[in-house]
């Protein structure tokens, strides 16, 4: 399957998105939310896979509606920043003072870029505005003749995983999938979720997976339809087959099959 780029109005501005459609129309739709690297080819490939399964797949570039995000959080800039962060001791990554000390050692031009990018990536992302862009994405899909209204799901990876569950807390999503994403904040937002949720996590992804118990507790408290799978030995981003370092084929294959079964149950395809 091959798709094409499209645009629609979001809360922050005009949103660019990759759209892949199956032959059958109308069909249920899935919003595919990218990792922190933005709308890269891997995300488009995932959208194509869903289209091949009979779903309309729309992958928005959540950084495209805001000029500051669009110009700063390019895949190249984010990759460069992540490479820099990977050189820091694990316990120091979120130590602002230490990070600034290490940034000061960089060449001036590179330092300026890293400072701007890290400030956005680590605490500076306007997640509330980006969530509203996703709500507008739901509205856009519901207005399209090739989409079955109210049969819209979402899936996200890493940063996109947290945005996927955030979207389910703010819009009537029929089915939500989280790939190793952070919990909603505050966790009580879970009470707003309308449809079933599937969470997929890596056993070695301690920062994310160690917090899943809070999500489970909230799902029980608010009596939501929730299922999850933890993959022992799998790190963060185990589904991304473009990363030799983190990709785990067996976990990714099982996760994909679970996602298709989940959407089959919830979206009826």
Image (cartoon, rainbow, N blue to C red):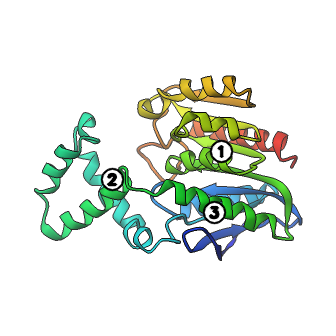
Counting from the top left corner in percent of width and height, residue 127 is at 50, 54
**Residue 20 drawn at (x, y percent):** 72, 67
Circle 2 sits on which residue? Answer: 82
Distance from disc 3 to disc 1, alpha carbons, whole Å, reads 19 Å
Q: Which is nearer the eye, 52 or 224?
A: 224
Q: Can you say whether 216 is above or below 170 in the image?
A: above
Which residue lies most toward the left here?
105
Mark sitting on residue 85: none
- The nearer-to-camera label among 1 and 2 is 1
Q: Is residue 263 visible?
A: yes
Residue name at image x 68 percent, y 35 percent: 191
Of the numbered discs 1 and 2, the one sitting upstream in the chain is: 2
At mark 1, the secondary structure is helix
Q: Earlier in the sequence, mark 3 or mark 2?
A: 3
Q: Position of residue 125 (x, y in %)?
A: 43, 56
Nearer-the-camera pick, 166 or 21: 166
Is the C-beta separation of discs 1 and 2 under 8 Å?
no
Q: Are marks 3 and 2 in contact (CB under 8 Å)?
A: no
Residue under pointer 3:
59
Residue wearing tag 1: 169
Q: Residues within 10 Å of mark 2 (few under 14, many from 20)?
A: some
| Residue depicted at x 71% and y 30% | 226
Question: In which quadrant of the rendered image does the N terminus lie?
Answer: bottom right
- Tell me the residue at 63%/29% (across/down): 229
Q: Earlier in the sequence, mark 3 or mark 1?
A: 3
């Amino acid at each position: 399957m091959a798709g094409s780029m499209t645009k629609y109005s979001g809360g922050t501005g005009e949103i660019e998105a990759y759209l892949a459609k199956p032959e059958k129309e109308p069909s249920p739709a899935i919003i595919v939310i990218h990792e922190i690297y933005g709308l890269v080819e891997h995300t488009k490939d995932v959208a194509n896979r869903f289209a091949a399964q009979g779903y309309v797949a729309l992958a928005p570039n959540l950084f495209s509606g805001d000029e500051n995000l669009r110009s700063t959080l390019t895949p190249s800039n984010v990759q460069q920043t992540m490479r820099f962060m990977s050189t820091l001791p694990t316990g120091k990554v979120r130590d602002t003072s230490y990070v600034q000390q290490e940034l000061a050692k960089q060449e001036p031009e590179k330092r300026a870029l890293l400072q701007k990018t890290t400030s956005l990536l680590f605490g500076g992302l306007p997640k509330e505005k980006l969530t509203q862009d996703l709500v507008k994405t739901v509205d856009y899909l519901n207005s399209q003749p090739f989409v079955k209204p109210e049969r819209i799901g979402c899936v996200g990876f890493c940063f996109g995983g947290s945005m996927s569950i955030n979207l389910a807390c703010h819009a009537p999503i029929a089915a939500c999938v989280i790939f190793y994403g952070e919990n909603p904040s505050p966790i009580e937002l879970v009470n707003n979720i309308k449809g079933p949720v599937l969470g997929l996590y890596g056993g070695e992804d301690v920062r994310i997976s160690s917090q899943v118990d809070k999500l489970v507790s909230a799902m029980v408290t608010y009596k939501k339809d929730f299922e999850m799978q933890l993959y022992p030995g799998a790190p963060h981003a185990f589904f991304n087959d473009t990363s030799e370092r983190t990709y785990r084929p067996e976990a990714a294959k099982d996760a994909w099959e679970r996602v298709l079964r989940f959407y089959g149950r919830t979206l009826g395809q």
